[in-house]
Image: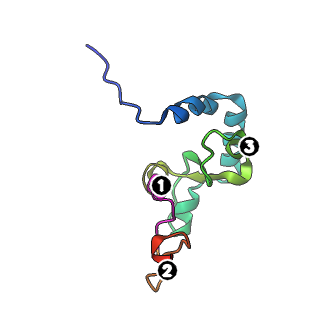
Amino acid sequence: MTESKVPDHRSTKAKKYRKCYGLKAWKAARTTQFARHRLCERCLQSETVAEATVVNHHTPHRGDWALFIDPNNHESVCALHHDGLIQREEKRGYVIGCDVNGRPLDPAHPWNQ
């Protein structure tokens, strides 16, 4: 029986920096982040409690080591937020959401241009 493999749709550049996630420095930074924030920071914003399982980069690092390892660029999130909302925001280029008046939260949203 052959093992089915999930296709990797990352860019060639992204595949090159994936190895950074296996480095001891990253594992230590991840452990430190979870020690500081064990709960999903995005869930807490909506008054929900969920365990964080992923350390997300506020600003996508795209291979930039300084951004990759900077603790001020890290946030603890649950897999649901990381694999859903955050990925959509990165593709769109702006934060998804609106205020009580229906106006987009992010000044970079096309509606605000």
Circle 3 is placed at which residue position?
A: 66
Report x, y in % for residue 109. 49, 70
Q: Tell which circle, 1 or 2, labels the residue nearer the N-terminal end.
A: 1
Residue range highlighted in magenta: 87-97
Report x, y in % for residue 102. 43, 82
Q: Amino acid at mark 1?
A: His
Give SS at disc 2.
loop
Report x, y in % for residue 91. 46, 54
Q: Residue at x 54, y 61 (%)?
A: 42
Q: How is the image coloured?
A: rainbow
Marks 1 and 2, how far apart at CA = 19 Å
Around disc 2, counting alpha carbons within 10 Å, would you say few (fewer than 14), some (14 to 19), or many (20 or more)? few
Q: Does the residue at mark 3 contact the one at mark 2 (Cβ under 8 Å)?
A: no
Q: Residue at x 68, y 47 (%)?
A: 33
Within the image, what quadrant is residue 19 found in? top right
Circle 2 is placed at which residue position?
A: 99
Residue 61 on the magenta span: no
Residue 5's place in the image compared with 80, above or below, is above
Residue 63's place in the image compared with 108, above or below, is above
Circle 1 is placed at which residue position?
A: 81
Q: Residue at x 55, y 68 (%)?
A: 45
Marks 3 and 2, how far apart at CA = 33 Å
Q: Tell which circle, 3 or 1, labels the residue nearer the N-terminal end.
A: 3
Q: Amino acid at mark 2?
A: Asp
For the view shown, which residue lies furthest in the bottom direction? 101
